[in-house]
């Protein structure tokens, strides 16, 4: 099933949401992660609803679920005398669903801008036809 919004537009929506939420972030900060995730999710939902509604008071013909996962890169080992980082934390995420393959679907995206801030950001969007 083709997404309700073109793939290139979904990438732009997700990138814009991440850019906006992380604009003041220099690195991973646990105290801000919940706010970053909320901002990313809410911006994506607002864009999807706006772009798939036919008018200001109409409802889109899909229900949406958005997931945002932020993973911290590993930092140097304290007191080890090593100047290099030990690498990244391992992470695997998967999702499955039972639905109408002709009307419903999902899409995932890795935000490339997170690498230079010491984090990986993975977005998943699901849509279910109403």
Image: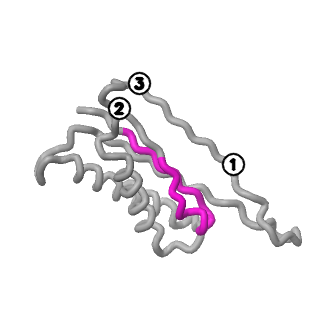
The residue wearing badge 1 is 90
Q: CA distance from mark 1 to mark 2?
A: 31 Å
Q: How is the image coloured?
A: one colour
Q: Is residue 111 magenta?
A: yes
In the rendered view, tell whether residue 77 sits above or below residue 91: below
Label 1 sits on a secondary structure element that is loop
Main SS category, magenta section: strand
Q: Residue at x 22, y 53 (%)?
A: 50
Q: Is residue 24 left or right of residue 100?
A: right
Give the mark nearest the N terminus, 2 or 3. Answer: 2
Instruction: Please give the range of residues in magenta.
Output: 109-126
Q: Residue furthest right?
A: 81
Q: x and y percent of residue 58 in the render?
A: 13, 46
User: Quarter holding the C terminus?
Assistant: top left
| Residues marked 1 and 3 touching at CB (< 8 Å) | no
Label 2 neighbourhood size at 10 Å, few (<14), some (14-19), many (20+)?
Answer: few
Q: Which label was assigned to residue 39?
A: none
Q: Residue 128's image quarter?
A: top left
Q: Position of residue 100 (x, y in %)?
A: 34, 24
Residue beneath disc 2: 1
Return the residue at label 3: 98
Say which of marks 2 and 3 sits in front.
Answer: 2
- Magenta segment includes 48: no
In the displayed structure image, the side of residue 72 where residue 68 appears, left or right: left
Give the x, y percent position of residue 6.
33, 46
Which callout, 1 or 3, points at the residue further toward the start of the chain? 1
Which marked residue is nearer to the observer: mark 1 or mark 2? 2
In the image, what residue occupies the spot 26% across and 38% down?
62
Quadrant housing the N terminus: top left
Badge 3 element: loop
């Amino acid at each position: 099933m083709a997404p309700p919004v073109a793939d290139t537009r979904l990438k732009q929506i997700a990138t814009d949401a991440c850019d906006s939420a992380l604009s003041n972030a220099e690195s991973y900060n646990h105290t801000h992660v919940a706010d970053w995730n909320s901002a990313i999710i809410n911006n994506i939902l607002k864009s999807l609803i706006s772009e798939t509604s036919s008018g200001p008071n109409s409802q889109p013909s899909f229900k949406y679920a958005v997931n945002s996962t932020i993973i911290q890169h590993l930092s140097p080992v304290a007191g080890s005398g090593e100047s290099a980082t030990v690498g990244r934390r391992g992470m695997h995420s998967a999702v499955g669903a039972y639905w109408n393959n002709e009307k419903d679907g999902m899409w995932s995206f890795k935000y490339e801008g997170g690498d230079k801030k010491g984090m990986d950001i993975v977005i998943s969007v699901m849509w279910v036809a109403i």
